[in-house]
Image (tube, helix red, strand yellow):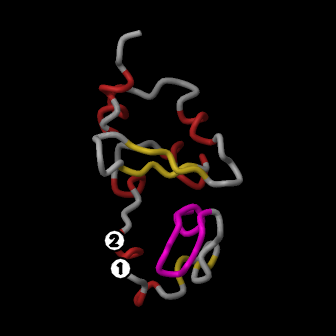
Amino acid sequence: MCCQVLTIEHFNKDAGVLCQHCVLGGGCKIYKKRPDVCQDYECDWMMERSIPSTLRPDKVGTILMEDADSDEYQAVCDPKKPMAWRWMWARPPSPRTCATWRLAKWWHQPG
């Protein structure tokens, strides 16, 4: 999903357009020679084992990305599902999930 949702300037690829090197269900055609921007990308869902499988990006249409300027996450949605981020909050996440995402402070704000 990251190869479709994210902008990749190296390939002059806009958000919402599938990368020309992506093989659906097969990965990247240029994986061994992919540019630094692709090598440096880490999928938080894959890296953080405590994020439940129900929040897998291709299932919910949203990628959670760390905000470089804060300790929170941004929801980057598939343009075909622009409101997908709302599904994730339809029911409260567990305190463990909140802590994992560093959203506990935001989630538990009074009022």
Left or right of residue 100: residue 29: right
Q: Give yes or no for residue 11 being in the magenta stretch.
A: yes
User: Residue at image x 29%, y 47%?
Assistant: 69
Q: Are marks 2 and 1 in contact (CB under 8 Å)?
A: yes
Q: Which mark is residue 36?
A: 1
Label 2 sits on residue:
40
What element does badge 2 sit on? helix
- In terms of depth relative to the viewer, which is nearer, 90 or 37? 37
In space, the residues marked 2 and 1 are separated at their CA atoms by 6 Å
Residue furthest toward the right?
80
The amino acid type found where label 1 is placed reads Asp
The C terminus, quarter of image: top left
Q: Is residue 108 magenta?
A: no
Count residues near mark 2 (Cα–Cα under 10 Å), then give few for <14, some for 14-19, many for 20+: few
Indicate left or right for 108 with 79 as reference.
left
On screen, residue 101 above or below 62: above
Image height of 56 relative to 8, above or below:
above
Could you say whether the residue bearing mark 1 is in a helix, strand or loop? helix
Number of marks drawn: 2
Q: Which mark is residue 71?
A: none
Task: Name the image quarter holding residue 38.
Answer: bottom left
**Up-down relation of residue 37 to residue 43 (above or below):** below
Residue drawn at the location 33% of the way across and 71% of the way down: 40
Where residue 21 appears, as percent x and y from the top left, is: 57, 83
Query: Amino acid under label 2?
Result: Asp
Highlighted range, magenta: 1-15
